[in-house]
Amino acid sequence: MANKKIPGRPFLKGNKFGKGRPRLSKEEKAFRKMTTAQIIDMISTFGAMTKDQLHEHVNKPAISMLELSFCKMWIDIVKNGDHSKFEFILNRAIGKVKEKHEINSTGGVMILRPNGEKVYMGANPEEIEE
């Protein structure tokens, strides 16, 4: 019974058509473990610093690994203009923005199918101009 074959296509490991999601850096992994209050505190602390002040803070021997990780990520954002990391920080601090799409139409819509059939949506067929 253990050798019973299951119908269907065999599983192929990996996605050969795309790269997939990029790996998280060490800083991003450490950042995921932070609370919202810690993130907001670090953004307010390190966001107000100049580049020189930030580099001085990173070189201090008594800096915590969490602060070091955040500083390295912050330097990378400023140096390389890495928008994805900045978006990651904002999503962790503020929360992801919900996207809403709303479609409004005052009248109806006539859809012409390839076979020539007309489909009316949203209003009486008499009210729609062709």
Image: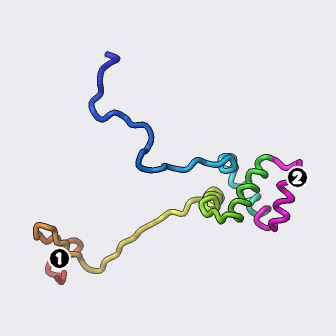
Give the image quarter of residue 112: bottom left
Q: Picture coordinates of residue 25 (x, y %)? A: 65, 48
Instruction: Identify the residue shown where x is 67% and y is 63%.
Output: 80
Q: Residue furthest top?
A: 1
Q: Which residue is mark 2?
A: 60
State the residue in front, 102 or 52: 52
Reply yes or no: does residue 92 show up in magenta. Answer: no
* Apparent side of residue 55 relative to residue 21 in the rendered image (left or right): right
Q: Which residue is mark 1?
A: 124
Q: Secondary structure at mark 1?
A: loop
State the residue in front, 56 or 116: 56
Q: Picture coordinates of residue 56 (x, y %)? A: 86, 59
Instruction: Identify the residue shown where x is 34% and y is 75%.
Output: 104
> Going from the N terminus, do you reach mark 1 or mark 2 first?
2
Q: Picture coordinates of residue 89 (x, y %)? A: 65, 58
Q: Amino acid at mark 1?
A: Asn
| Quadrant of the rendering where the N terminus is positioned | top left
Q: Residue furthest right?
A: 61
| Quadrant of the rendering where the C terminus is positioned | bottom left
The way the protein has been coloured in the rendering is rainbow
Q: Which residues are magenta?
A: 46-64
The image shows residue 25, relative to residue 114, as above or below, that is above
Q: Secondary structure at mark 2?
A: loop
The image shows residue 67, relative to residue 90, as above or below, that is above
